Image: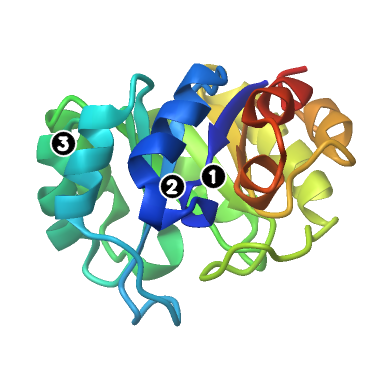
Amino acid sequence: MLVAPSILSADFGRLNEEIQAICDGGCDLVHVDVMDGHFVPNLTIGPVVVSSVAKIATKPLDIHLMVQNNTFFVELFAPLKPKYISFHIEEEKHPHRLIQKIRDYGISPAIVLNPHTPPEAIEYLLEDLDMVLLMSVNPGFGGQKFIPSVLEKAKKLKELINKRNPNCLIEVDGGVGDKNIHLLKDAGVDVVVAGNYVFTNASYENAIKSLQI
């Protein structure tokens, strides 16, 4: 299991130290939540701050766009050369075109599904994707409780992936911790995003290792 701590839960007054700590603690990716105040009722960070994160991080960035006008934001963040850029299928009218745009930048494209969106909604996009992110909370804020139905959803998605593109990863974001990590693993999940669980732990390294099963 790969672990991508979400810096949404970090202490932004000590962001430099927080990024160094999770990278030194053995995380696999650094998850960056970009919210525009329109697609979700929250605002987070833009490319100026993420540029600083990219300079500090020794692990690849995993940028999750929770925005309207996805193309505009892809163009803003692509110069930072993250490993992944993910966008919400609920907000995109031309997903094939945007997937190709992301890939043309040399970045791995990913699509995000909100809790109510079925995996079948992206079945015919799977061959073009490197990852699918399943939200296990409603997007917008950290610290929410895990929605258990995502486990069944992950299993269904895994079946579709095995048919269409076995190299595509499944990522889950929201309410992840040591209490449900084995269930997620059994459901076929490859990557977990963990915010509160990591950043409220006395040892970031111990928290990250407890999820790398």
Give the position of the C terminus as an image quadrant: top right
Residue position for label 2: 111
Residue position for label 3: 80
Task: Give me the C-alpha separation between circle 1 and circle 3.
Answer: 21 Å
Q: Decide: few, some or many residues near mark 1? Use Cα within 10 Å; few <14, some 14-19, many ≥20.
A: many
Give whichever of discs 1 and 3 has the lower sequence position: 3
Task: Give me the C-alpha separation between circle 2 and circle 3.
Answer: 19 Å
Residue position for label 1: 133
Residue type at numbered disc 1: Leu
Mark 1 or mark 3, whichever is nearer to me: 3
Mark 2 or mark 3, whichever is nearer to me: 3
Q: Decide: few, some or many residues near mark 2? Use Cα within 10 Å; few <14, some 14-19, many ≥20.
A: many
Which residue corresponds to the image point at 34% horizontal and 19% vertical from the top-left?
A: 58
Q: Secondary structure at mark 1?
A: strand
Residue type at numbered disc 3: Leu
In front: 59, or 191?
59
Q: Quadrant of residue 114?
A: bottom right
- Residue 69 x/y as whole percent: 21, 69
